[in-house]
Image (spheres, rainbow, N blue to C red):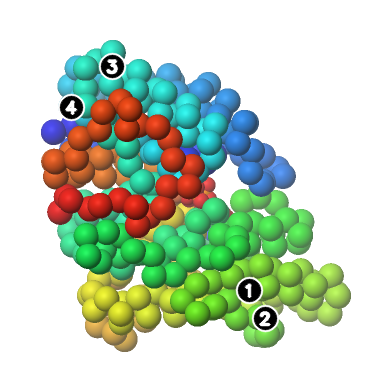
Amino acid sequence: MIALGIEGTAHTLGVGVVTEDRVLANVFHTLTTDRGGIHPKEAAEHHARLMRPLLKKALETSGIGMKDVDLIAFSQGPGLGPALRVVATAARALSIKYRKPIVGVNHCIAHVEITKMFGVRDPVGLYVSGGNTQVLALEGGRYRVFGETLDIGIGNAIDTFARELGIGFPGGPRIEKLAREGKKYIELPYAVKGMDLSFSGILTEAVRKYRSGRYRVEDLAYSFQETAFAALVEVTERALAHTGKDEVVLVGGVAANNRLREMLSIMAEDRGVDFFVPPYDLCRDNGAMIAYTGLRMYLGGVRFRIEDTRVRQKFRTDEVEVTWG
Ligand code: ATP
Ligand code: FE2
């Protein structure tokens, strides 16, 4: 079976083509601005402009035509309303024009589900990106959120700190590089609140310390990462303990970070659980994860009528009944 998936919850438009066990194409384009931040209308215009060229490129890359596609999947939410509507409209048009079934996919769940293409069976997922920070796992037929950020995503926190340092956007890779030169740990507020996380305190304090001029930026970058990542690892470990699962996966754009990978792999090894990170193009926002999750849903009996395809800006991870397996 061949599924085509369209992702567009935020600033990346992605189109992927997959089978049950292979990615045939995974192309994307990201709207970037120097200011960073959220731009729902600009994202929608970006997606509308790039929809045709990316669809064409995905089909060319996979060497198939629309007639060979068996299913259209799209990111139904959560995300920016105007951006979601462009994606849903395109998916509906394809579904109607080519008479293909359509399935709406929860973006957060797709980030974790794609790991199953690589033999992962039933993991605890740490999903970390610009806008999202969530620890999720299947329990009782749904993906439950065991911990999530109460304010900003870890990626946004890092990007905002990087902008304050004047090192541009996106900040993740640059902060990671600076952090490698850090020598001294500077105390910052810890980010765990119960089972949830909060990164605004670390950010405010790191900015304050930077402005005081009394600290090396390398030490601040290093301390920022150590403090924030320790909190992520702690909440993930507690979810593993609670669920008794023996696999943990790291997904989302921040999965690029080598220090975070290292900290998680050490925790996994200590607990005797498997640790997996997908190739980066399947970690970041992408169409292949949407296509693959849609395909699994469809094979598991999920069916959508056109009326069911309305976008869901606040689509919660635990709203989806997981009937596929
Ligand atoms: P979402 O819509 O899921 O929130 P997004 O729009 O933030 O996704 P992604 O590509 O998933 O897009 O993630 C981008 C984020 O990843 C940015 O905040 C960026 O700084 C961060 N990032 C990228 N590389 C690294 C790195 N090496 N270390 C830390 N963060 C990183
Ligand atoms: Fe994402």
Q: In this view, does 167 lie to the left or right of 279?
A: right
Would you call the spot at circle 2 few (<14 residues within 10 Å), some (14-19), or many (20 or more)? some
Determine which residue is flagged by label 3: 96
Q: Residue at x 48, y 47 (%)?
A: 314
Amino acid on which disc 1 is placed: Phe
Q: Residue at x 34, y 52 (%)?
A: 319
Q: Which residue is drawn at 44% across and 70% down?
A: 147
Q: Is residue 152 left or right of residue 279?
A: right
Amino acid on which disc 4 is placed: Asp
Q: Which of marks 4 and 2 is nearer the N terminus?
A: 4
Work out which residue is located at the far top of the displayed protein and give it. Answer: 97
Determine which residue is flagged by label 4: 70
Determine which residue is flagged by label 1: 224
Q: Callout 4: helix, strand or loop?
A: loop
Front one among 238 and 4: 238
Would you call the spot at circle 1 few (<14 residues within 10 Å), some (14-19), or many (20 or more)? many
In the figure, 261 relative to 131: above or below?
below
What distance separates the C-alpha of mark 2 from that of mark 1?
A: 7 Å
Work out which residue is located at the far right of the displayed protein and give it. Answer: 212
Amino acid on which disc 2 is placed: Leu
Q: At which x and y percent is residue 229?
A: 51, 74
What distance separates the C-alpha of mark 4 from that of mark 2?
A: 51 Å
Determine which residue is flagged by label 2: 188
